[in-house]
Image (tube, rainbow, N blue to C red):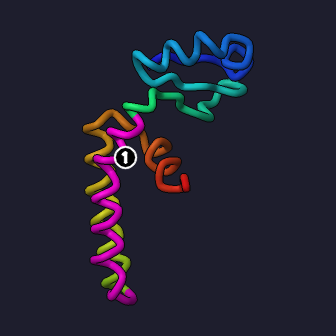
Amino acid sequence: MITMTSLAAQNQFGTLIDASQRQPVTVTRHGRPVAVVMSFEDYQASMQTIAPHVAALISESYPLRGKAAGDSMRQHLASMSNLAAEEGLTSADVTRMLHEP
């Protein structure tokens, strides 16, 4: 994965977009990753992979309460984490995608 500073991303936006068409680009600020820029096609593919698992998590966990709900949530999250890792996504990528509208 290519890495760019936030300043370089601002000053070389066209380069950032071009690079993201080939592979995801990590944008850093003060040496810490703060964003990933990827092609729209890669984004759609990653959402199609993750969305069914999120739907399963919600439908299976909704009627549960207490410890059973917590256990179910942990099991699904572990499964999603493994799937995301197989797809080359980090936990930060998954968290960001789950919080997008």
Residue 30 rendering spot, x and y as whole percentages: 72, 26
Looking at the rendering, which quadrant does residue 56 occupy?
A: bottom left
In this rendered view, identify the residue nearer to me: 45 or 68: 45
Residue 43 higher or lower than 59, as above or below: above
x 55%, y 18%: residue: 17
State the extent of the magenta-drawn residues as a range.
Answer: 43-66
Residue 77 higher or lower than 34, as above or below: below
Looking at the rendering, which quadrant does residue 68 occupy?
A: bottom left
In this rendered view, identify the residue nearer to me: 18 or 5: 18
Residue 14 higher or lower than 27, as above or below: above
x 63%, y 30%: residue: 32
Residue 19 rendering spot, x and y as whole percentages: 49, 13
Disc 1 is placed on an element classified as helix
x 31%, y 76%: residue: 59
Q: Quadrant of the C terminus?
A: bottom right
Q: Is the magenta stretch mostly helix, strand or loop?
A: helix
| Residue ID for mark 1 | 47
Q: In which quarter of the image is the N terminus?
A: top left
Asked if the magenta segment contains residue 56, the reply would be yes
Residue 98 rendering spot, x and y as whole percentages: 47, 55
x 33%, y 33%: residue: 88
Residue type for callout 1:
Met
Residue 20 higher or lower than 35, as above or below: above
Residue 97 rendering spot, x and y as whole percentages: 48, 48
Count of numbered marks: 1
Label 1 Cα neighbours within 10 Å, binned few <14 / some 14-19 / many ≥20: some
Asked if the magenta segment contains residue 48, the reply would be yes
